[in-house]
Image (spheres, rainbow, N blue to C red):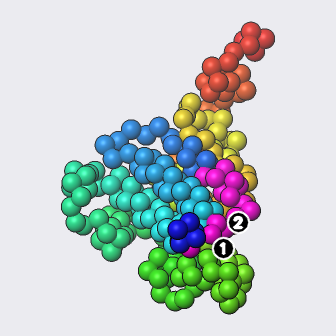
Amino acid sequence: MVEIFNHWNVKPFSLSRANEYLEDLNDLRFSDSGLVTEANPFFFVNESCQLLANSVNLIKLGYFDCAFYSVREAIELSLSGLYLFCNPEKLKAWSRQENGFELRTMVPELKAGKEEYANIKELFRDFFERLDMKKKLMNKYVHKQGYKSFYYHYNNINAYGKQERISTLISDYEAALHDTITAVALYRLVIDPFPILMLDENIAFRMPDLVAEPFSKSFICKYFSDEYVERYKKSIIFKSYYDNFKAQPLQNEAVYALIHWQLFERKDF
C-alpha cells in the first residue's frame, strides 16, 4: 500500500537562487509610499509579491505547473491593482466578483485612460513584447500542452532525457520569474516614481519624510539595468515628480537628519 501512494509523490526541484529571489521581492514589498486611496494599489503589489514567493516555494516542492500559474497570476493581479487605482468607482464591482476585469478589458482601458501607463508601455515596448512571449510559454505548462508539461517526464526515473527536461524547465521558470518581477516593478512605478527618484541624492535631500524605500542597487542591477533606469527617467510621471521636487529648497545634512530620522545633534544647531 505504501508503494502505491509513493507512486504519486512529486519529485522536488533544486533552485539554487531561491533565497535570493525571495530577498529581491522585499524591494517591491517595501516600496509602499504610504498613499491612502479607496483602491490601494500597494495592497495588490504586496499580494503579487506573495504569489511570486509562493511560486518559488512551489517549484522547489516540484509543483511546477502551479508555480508557473502563480507567476502568471502575479502579472494579472498587479495590473488589476493599477486598474482599480485609476478606476476606484469599479472597486465594488470587483469585490462582488463581477465580470469586466479580464486583461483584454483592463489593458485597453488603461492605455486609453491612464497616460502614465500608456507612456511606460511605449517606453518599454520591447520588454513587454518579451513578457508576452513568456506568458505564452507559461500557458503551455499551465494548460499541459506538450509532453514537457507532464509530471511523468520529471517523476519517472526511467523517463528519457529527464535531466535535460528538468534543466529546460528550471531555465524557463527563472526567465519567466525574472521578467515578471520587472513587470510588477514597472506597474508599481506607474503609481509614483519614488523607488527610482529617491536614488538621486540631489532630489532625496529636497523630499519630506516618506514611507517609501528606494530600490536597492542590487535590485536595479538584476531587474532594470542602468539603461532601463534612464528610459524610465524619460517618462511623464518621473519628469513631473522630478520637476516638482527640484523646485524645493535643498536640505543640509542636519535638516535632512531631523526631517527623515527625527535625529538632532546640538552641535548642528
Identify the amino acid type marked 2: Ser
Nearest to the eye among marks 1 and 2: give it.
2
208, above or below 129, in the image: above
Q: How many marks?
A: 2
Q: Which residues are magenta?
A: 7-25
In 3D space, how far apart are the residues under numbered discs 1 and 2 (Cα atoms)?
9 Å
Mark toward the start of the polypeptide (1 vs 2): 2
Residue identifier under label 2: 14
Extreme residue in the right direction: 267
Kind of element beneath mark 2: loop
Residue 73 visible to an observer of this rendering: yes
- Residue at 66% x, 27% y is 256
Q: Quarter of the image containing the C terminus?
A: top right
Quadrant hosting residue 227: bottom right
Extreme residue in the front direction: 1
Residue 218: x and y in percent read: 73, 54
Q: In this orientation, which residue lies closer to the viewer: 219 or 109?
A: 219
Residue 252: x and y in percent read: 71, 27
Please rate how many residues cluster around mark 1, counting C-alpha atoms within 10 Å: few if below 14, some from 14 to 19, many from 20. some
- Residue at 55% x, 34% y is 210
Circle 1/circle 2 CB separation < 8 Å: yes
Residue identifier under label 1: 170
171, above or below 238, in the image: below
- Residue at 70% x, 64% y is 15
